[in-house]
C-alpha cells in the first residue's frame, strides 16, 4: 500500500477553499429550508383542509423521490422549461431548501403540537394575535424541543450537500475529484475531504450542545 | 358588564351547557360552583371565547362577542383569565411574562409596561422574583404571577378557572389572599372554584351548575344555608 499525501499538498489550499463553498451552501439551504418548513408546518396544523392537503402532498413528493433526481430535474429541466439558465449553486440551494423544508416541516409540526395547549390559551386570553403568538410564544418553545432533531437535519444536509458535485458545484467533494483527476491519486484527496466533513459535523454537534444548554437556562 | 342569553355549548353530540342565561354586574364577584363535568369551566371559557358558543349570545361591556363582526382580540384584552395550571410562558422571565402582552398588544413602551409590572409584582408580593424564570417558582408563586400577568392588561373583568385546584394545600391561602385583595379593588370577577369557604366569603352571588343547567343563582348566604334544589342540597352535603 502506497500513500502519498505529499503529492496533493500543493492542491490543499484548493480543497480547503471548498469548505467555504460547502458551508455557505449548507447554511443557506438550512435557513431557507427551515423557514419554508415552518410555514409548511403551519399549513399542516391549519384548520383549512385544502392547505393541509397541499402541505401533505408537497411533503410526500419530496420524501418519495430521490434527492439526486430532484437536483437533476431542477438543474437540467429548468432551462428547458422556462428558459432560465440556472447556475449549479442556485439549483442546489433551491432543491435542498425545498427538500429540507419537506423533512423539517414534519419535525416542526410535531414540535408545535408538543407545546402545552395552555400556552396558546394564555396568549389568546391576553388578546395576542395569531402571528405574534406563533412567533413569540409557540415557536420558540417548539424549536427548543426539536433542536436535536433540527441539528440532525442540518448534519444530513451538510453531508448530502456533496450531491451538488454531480451538477458541477465546486464544493469539497468536487474539489477532491478534481485533484484526483489531476494527480491520479484517489485515496488521499478523498480521505482529506472525508476528515474535513467529519470535523465539520462534529463542530456542528458541539455548537448545538452549547446552544441547547443556553436554551435550557429557563428550566 | 357580562350578559349571557340562552347560551348553549356542545362538543359534538355532547351538550355541555344548556340554555344558560344570567348577568354579572360591574364590580360584582360571582362564584361558579358545581360538581365536575357540570360545565363550569366551559361557561367561563365561553366568556372570552376560548370556547365558541354553539348558540345564544354573550355580551361583554355591551358588545355581543358571539357576533361574527366582533373583534374578539379587543374583547379579550379587556377580560383577564387565570388558569388552573398557570400557563406562564416558561421561556420568559416573570418580568417578561408580565410585560409581553402590554407591549405587544397594547403597544406600551418597555418602560411603561415595566412600571405596571413592578407595581403588580409588589401587590402580589413577588417583587424580588422579577428576573426569575417561572420554573424557579413554587406553585403558589406561579399562580400569583399569572394573576399579575392578567392584571397587567388592566382588564375590567377577571376570570378565574379553578385557580387553586392544582396547588399544594399550603399554597392555596397565599393565592386566595391575593384574590381577596383584588375583590377590594372593585373589579368584576367570575371564579370557578371548589373553595366553598372562599366563595361564601367573597362572592356577591353563587351560580350553581349541574349537568349543564344553571340550577341556582343566589347570594351566598341564601345558597349555602337554604338551597332551593335537591341537587344543590346533595352537593353541599358532600362538600361542606
Image (cartoon, grey):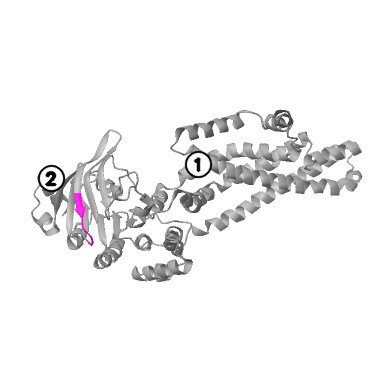
Which chain letter matches label 1?
A
Question: Looking at the image, is B15 positioned above or below residue A15?
Answer: above
The residue lying at 34 percent from left, 68 percent from top is B124
| Residue tagged 2 | B231
Q: Looking at the picture, how far across and down is residue B99, in whole percent?
A: 44, 63
Q: Is residue B200 left or right of residue B74?
A: left
Identify the residue at the far front of this view.
B69
Is disc 2 placed on a helix, strand or loop? helix
Q: Is residue B25 magenta?
A: yes
- What residue span does the magenta drawing correspond to? B22-27
Which of A207 and B144 lies nearest the eye of the viewer? B144
Q: Residues within 10 Å of mark 2 (few under 14, many from 20)?
A: some
Q: Is residue A174 left or right of residue B53?
A: right
Q: Nearer the viewer, mark 2 or mark 1?
A: 1
| Residue tagged 1 | A42
- In contact (CB < 8 Å): disc 2 and disc 1: no
Q: Is residue A33 left or right of residue A43?
A: right
Q: Is residue B223 magenta?
A: no
Question: Looking at the image, is A50 positioned above or below residue B219?
Answer: above
The residue lying at 66 percent from left, 49 percent from top is A204
Q: Looking at the picture, how far across and down is residue B224, in whole percent?
A: 12, 56
Q: Is residue B226 visible?
A: yes
Q: Looking at the picture, how far across and down is residue A15, in whole percent?
A: 82, 45
Mark 2 to mark 1 CA distance (whole Å)? 46 Å
Which of A146 and B61 lies nearest the eye of the viewer? B61
- Quadrant in which the N terminus of chain B is drawn: bottom left
Is disc 1 placed on a helix, strand or loop? helix
Q: Is residue A170 left or right of residue A149?
A: right
The number of numbered discs placed on residues in the rendered structure image is 2
Amino acid at each position: 500500500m502506497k500513500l502519498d499525501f505529499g503529492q496533493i499538498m500543493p492542491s490543499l489550499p484548493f480543497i480547503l477553499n471548498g469548505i467555504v463553498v460547502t458551508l455557505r451552501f449548507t447554511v443557506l439551504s438550512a435557513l431557507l429550508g427551515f423557514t419554508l418548513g415552518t410555514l409548511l408546518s403551519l399549513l399542516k396544523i391549519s384548520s383549512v383542509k385544502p392547505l393541509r392537503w397541499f402541505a401533505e402532498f408537497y411533503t410526500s413528493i419530496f420524501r418519495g423521490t430521490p434527492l439526486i433526481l430532484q437536483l437533476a430535474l431542477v438543474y437540467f429541466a429548468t432551462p428547458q422549461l422556462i428558459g432560465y439558465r440556472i447556475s449549479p449553486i442556485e439549483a442546489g440551494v433551491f432543491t435542498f431548501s425545498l427538500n429540507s423544508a419537506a423533512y423539517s416541516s414534519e419535525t416542526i409540526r410535531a414540535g408545535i403540537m408538543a407545546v402545552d395547549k395552555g400556552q396558546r390559551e394564555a396568549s389568546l386570553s391576553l388578546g395576542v394575535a395569531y402571528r405574534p403568538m406563533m412567533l413569540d410564544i409557540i415557536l420558540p418553545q417548539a424549536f427548543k424541543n426539536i433542536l436535536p432533531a433540527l441539528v440532525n437535519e442540518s448534519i444530513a444536509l451538510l453531508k448530502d450537500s456533496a450531491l451538488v458535485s454531480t451538477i458541477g458545484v465546486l464544493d469539497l467533494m468536487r474539489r477532491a475529484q478534481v485533484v484526483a483527476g489531476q494527480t491520479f491519486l484517489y485515496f488521499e484527496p478523498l480521505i482529506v475531504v472525508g476528515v474535513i466533513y467529519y470535523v465539520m459535523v462534529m463542530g456542528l454537534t458541539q455548537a448545538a450542545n452549547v446552544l441547547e444548554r443556553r436554551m435550557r437556562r429557563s428550566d | 358588564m357580562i350578559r349571557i342569553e340562552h347560551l348553549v355549548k356542545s362538543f359534538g353530540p355532547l351538550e355541555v351547557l344548556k340554555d344558560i342565561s344570567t348577568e354579572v354586574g360591574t364590580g360584582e364577584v360571582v362564584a361558579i360552583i358545581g360538581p365536575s363535568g357540570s360545565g363550569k369551566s366551559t361557561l367561563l371559557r365561553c366568556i372570552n371565547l376560548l370556547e365558541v358558543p354553539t348558540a345564544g349570545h354573550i355580551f361583554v361591556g355591551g358588545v355581543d362577542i358571539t357576533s361574527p363582526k366582533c373583534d374578539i382580540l379587543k374583547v379579550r384584552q379587556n377580560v383577564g383569565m387565570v388558569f388552573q395550571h398557570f400557563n406562564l410562558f416558561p421561556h420568559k422571565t416573570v418580568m417578561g411574562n408580565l410585560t409581553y402582552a402590554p407591549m405587544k398588544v397594547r403597544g406600551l413602551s418597555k418602560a411603561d409596561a415595566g412600571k405596571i409590572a413592578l407595581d403588580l409584582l409588589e401587590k402580589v408580593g413577588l417583587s424580588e422574583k422579577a428576573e426569575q424564570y417561572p420554573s424557579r417558582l413554587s406553585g403558589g408563586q406561579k399562580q400569583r404571577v399569572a394573576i399579575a400577568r392578567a392584571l397587567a392588561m388592566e382588564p375590567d373583568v377577571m376570570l378565574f378557572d379553578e385557580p387553586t385546584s392544582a396547588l399544594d394545600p399550603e399554597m392555596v391561602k397565599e393565592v386566595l389572599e391575593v384574590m381577596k385583595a383584588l375583590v377590594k379593588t372593585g373589579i368584576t370577577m367570575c371564579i370557578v372554584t371548589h373553595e366553598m369557604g372562599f366563595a361564601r366569603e367573597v362572592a356577591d352571588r353563587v351560580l350553581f351548575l349541574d349537568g349543564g343547567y344553571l340550577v341556582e343563582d343566589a347570594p351566598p348566604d341564601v345558597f349555602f344555608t337554604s338551597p332551593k334544589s335537591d341537587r344543590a342540597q346533595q352537593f353541599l352535603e358532600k362538600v361542606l
